[in-house]
Amino acid sequence: MWKNIFFVKAFYKVIILFSIFVMVANCARTGRPEGGPKDEDAPLFVNSIPPYNTVKFDKKIIKLNFNEFVTLKELNKQLVVSPPLKNPPLITPQGSPSKEIKIQILDTLQENTTYIFNFGNAVQDNNEGNLLENFKYVFSTGNYIDSLTTAGSIKDAKLQEPPKSVNVLMYRIDTSYTDSIVYKKKPNYITNTLDTTNFKFTNLKDGKYFMIALKEDISDYIFNPKFDKIGFLTDTIHLPKDSTITKPITLFKEIQPFKFVRGREVTKGKLQFAFEGEQTDMKITVISKVPENFKSVSKFEKERDSLNYWFTNIEADSLNFVVSNEKFSDTVTVKLRKEKQDSLTINMLPKTVLHFRDTIFVESNNPIIKIDTSKISLIDKDTISINYKTLISARENKIGFIFDKKPSQKYTFIALKEAFEDLFSFKNDSLNASFSTKEIDDYGRLTLTVNNINNENIIVELLSGKNQDALVERQIMNSSKTIIFDLLDPKKYTLRVYIDSNKNNKWDTGNFLMKQFPEKIIYFKELTNFEIRANYFLEENISIE
């Protein structure tokens, strides 16, 4: 009996404590009551101290009040202060909900200047995350609020995907203005495209301006050509006349001048010469005394700004080289300390399916200098030997095996032991790989009629891949013609056309100081991310003006 009484008392204590906890939790919660309508309204700006559009502003603290609890999301990305401040303002609270946002100004403000604190979409309510879009606070240290506006749009010179979160900068053209101002001085006005390609400036002063756009990793509003993309307008902006910029600003990445960085030892017998900027015909010439049988091979590293240099074994503590191209020459010493040398490793490409556009490649870590074809055979499913030709890549450690492929066939590639020998006299173990081809009907075709109205030099590229940036085929022409992209694997493709203005058979980017725009690139809506199916023959017409 006493046990039962004790159990009942303990049970009631638990119930009372649980009820108190639920009541406290419900009182503390700022969200909507369970079962109530969903809050879909954005928070409202109620008032501020000092008031919005205050003139003769001379305060250090600003308080912004809202009708409900708000939080700040991605403030560092969203907030743009124009004109820019040397020291960012201190804004609180961050990370916790509040009905008040406090701005502490840490800089000395300019005289007779209208300031805009544009929060973008950073302010949202605490309950449902409803955004107070494009919220801004404006004041002036002068006697009036500047009220002029201008707007425009941004595009990328090469990428089809619209650029986002691009800073647009305006510099007042006065006696202190020079073209180099973008490299060393912050602008008079800043805005940001946020999640669109459009921008708008507000609260501007009348006058003449120069406008650029910067795609920056770090928004310091200073053009760093090594990291930033830039776009510019050649025409001067006259306010209030130019309230709309009709021509989009085109972003591009400049190619930096060649700059040699350093040479270093990677492994025994392999050096790496790193550089920055434009890849040129960089040459590495050894000037140290070396044996008569000394051999070396140099090749650029794929997708990296470096050149690899392999050389045969030598007894030396260091080697001296001349690194040169048409415009550069320097002497460099590389110390030799590594004791381990990479043995030969080989990889076969592709893995299993051999498409008609594919080539069988033997890919190696070290450069192969000898091939014993008597130890290499290629046979079909009937064990009939197939004739082939070898092609050694000049830029990569790859050897291609070229032969006439047949539909619905199986091939076996056999390389006996010591068929390949690298620069260090390492030889391969035996290799055995099998590949199969598909039927011709498993592929599609694109027939493209190009109407080249002005007989421009144009480069037509067919792209594929996850991001539609892998080159499938390139064709160059300077007249109207019909071209065929045949034996296309069923998947999605994109067509891209370059207007090769300087006729050097490649796309050239722009240059800010030379006021040179990038060469024009054209994408076609109907030929963007389009699908080619098996046994499918697509015919399209495009016009180039």
Image: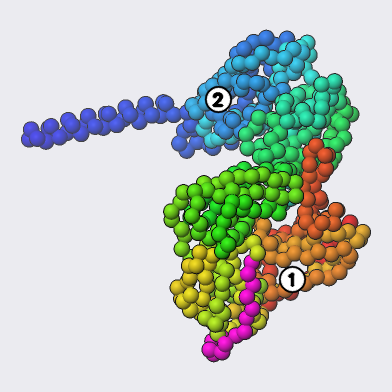
Residue at the extreme right: 454
The quadrant in which residue 462 appears is bottom right
- Of 19 and 450, nearer the camera is 450
Q: Is 464 placed above or below 440 here?
A: above
- Of 400 and 8, nearer the camera is 400
Q: Mark 1 or 2, which is nearer the eye?
A: 1
Please provide the residue range marked out in magenta.
380-393
- Of 25 and 538, nearer the camera is 538
Q: Please tell me the numbered disc located at residue 155.
A: none
The quadrant in which residue 330 appears is top right
The secondary structure type at the circle numbered 2 is: strand
**Residue sitting at x 54%, y 80%:** 376
Q: Is 108 placed above or below 346 here?
A: above
Amino acid at pointer 2 = Glu
Q: Is 368 placed above or below 76 here?
A: below
Q: Is residue 216 visible?
A: yes
Q: Mark 1 points at which residue?
A: 485
Earlier-in-chain disc, 1 versus 2: 2
How far is disc 1 from disc 2 in space, using C-alphas?
60 Å
The N terminus, quarter of image: top left
**Residue sitting at x 68%, y 71%:** 488
**Residue sitting at x 35%, y 31%:** 22
Q: How crowded is mark 1: few (under 14 residues within 10 Å), some or many (20 or more)?
A: some
Residue at the extreme left: 1
The secondary structure type at the circle numbered 1 is: strand
Q: Please tell me the numbered disc located at residue 68.
A: 2
The C terminus, quarter of image: bottom right
Q: Name the dominant secondary structure of the magenta segment.
A: loop
Q: Residues within 10 Å of mark 2 (few under 14, many from 20)?
A: some
